Image (cartoon, rainbow, N blue to C red):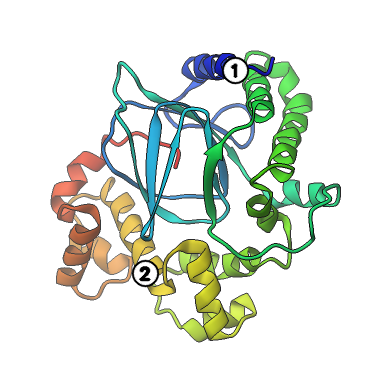
Amino acid sequence: MTDPDLLLAEIRDLISAHTRADLRTPIDGLLLARMESSDPEYSLTEPLLVVMAQGAKQLLLGDKVYEYRAGDVLIVTADLPVTGHFIEASPEQPSLGLGLVLRPATIAPLLLESARPRTTPSGPAMATGPASPELLDAAARLLRLLDSPADIPVLAPMIEREILWRLLTGPYADVIRQIGLADSSLTHISRAIRWIRDNYAEPMRIADLASLAGMSPAAFHRHFRAITALSPLQFQKRIRLQEARSLLASHPSDIAGIGHLVGYDSPSQFNREYRRLFGTPPGQDAARLRTTTPHLP
């Protein structure tokens, strides 16, 4: 079956039947989400393929806006701090989507079978566009395995490879290839991104990050912004504030302590930058965070 409308209808039904509170499923790397609110959300993505089955969402990365709707895919190839909101999501008409974690170790062997060039230019670590009928068909078959748990260990890895192959041989090939190529700009910049994620509260020296990425400071700045749409300093600040927001969900009364923990020596600066990003002071934001539902990017 390759009729996109019929496939989307089946995908919607399967997501509705198997969505859980924490997004995870018995299939390793497969995530399912149901969102009933259009409130803004702030998250740190991971490399991920998202297939939107119902509804729509807008994501803001730096000054770039990405929008994807039912029948579209979102491809994320790096850990990125994004702001997003579902469009017109409600309990009566929720947004439904599935996510598949994109793993370099799974993608790299497929590159040997692809006729594409071995090198690709650096570019944004995010892309959106229509899903092909073949990709929707593979996604539907992966979801069907949730009703046949005994088949998952054998068939799920095969269907995952098929989905990745569809991406590598379609219009998103250059975006996906960057994950699997050991010498791509994305791979080098990802080392710096991981350092910032793991050490976000520490002082950051551009020269050290450039050395970690194997680039000159000027080349590092250029490639970092091309991939993340942010400067390294903006990226670090966004990580700090999003980590602070996550901590506030479980420690809402320790605002000053959380600000210091994520790298702010000045409580007033922390409050000011938190409000600028999230639209409300940390104290007022904490109560709402305790009821936030997990979501896909």
Q: Residue 139 at x, y = what percent?
A: 64, 26
Query: Which residue sits at x=81%, y=49%?
Result: 109
Q: Nearer the viewer, mark 2 or mark 1?
A: 1
Neighbours of disc 1 within 10 Å: few (<14), some (14-19), many (20+): many
Horizontal side of 183 relative to 113 (left or right) equals left
Vertical relation: 150 (above or below) 210: above
Q: Which quarter shows the C terminus?
A: top left
Which residue lies under the disc numbered 1?
Answer: 7
Q: Secondary structure at mark 2?
A: helix
Residue type beneath disc 2: Gln
Depth order, front residue of 163/101: 163
Query: Which residue sits at x=56%, y=44%?
Result: 48
Query: Which residue sits at x=66%, y=24%?
Result: 142
Q: CA distance from mark 2 to mark 1?
A: 40 Å
Q: Secondary structure at mark 1?
A: helix
**Label disc, if present, on residue 61 of the rendered structure:** none
**Label disc, if present, on residue 234 of the rendered structure:** 2
Asked whether the beta carbons under mark 2 and mark 1 sit within 8 Å of each other, the answer is: no
Depth order, front residue of 97/267: 97
Neighbours of disc 2 within 10 Å: few (<14), some (14-19), many (20+): few
Q: Image quadrant of residue 277? A: bottom left
Depth order, front residue of 290/110: 110
Q: Image quadrant of residue 293? A: top left
Query: Which residue sits at x=27%, y=69%?
Result: 260
Q: Residue 1 at x, y = what percent?
A: 69, 14
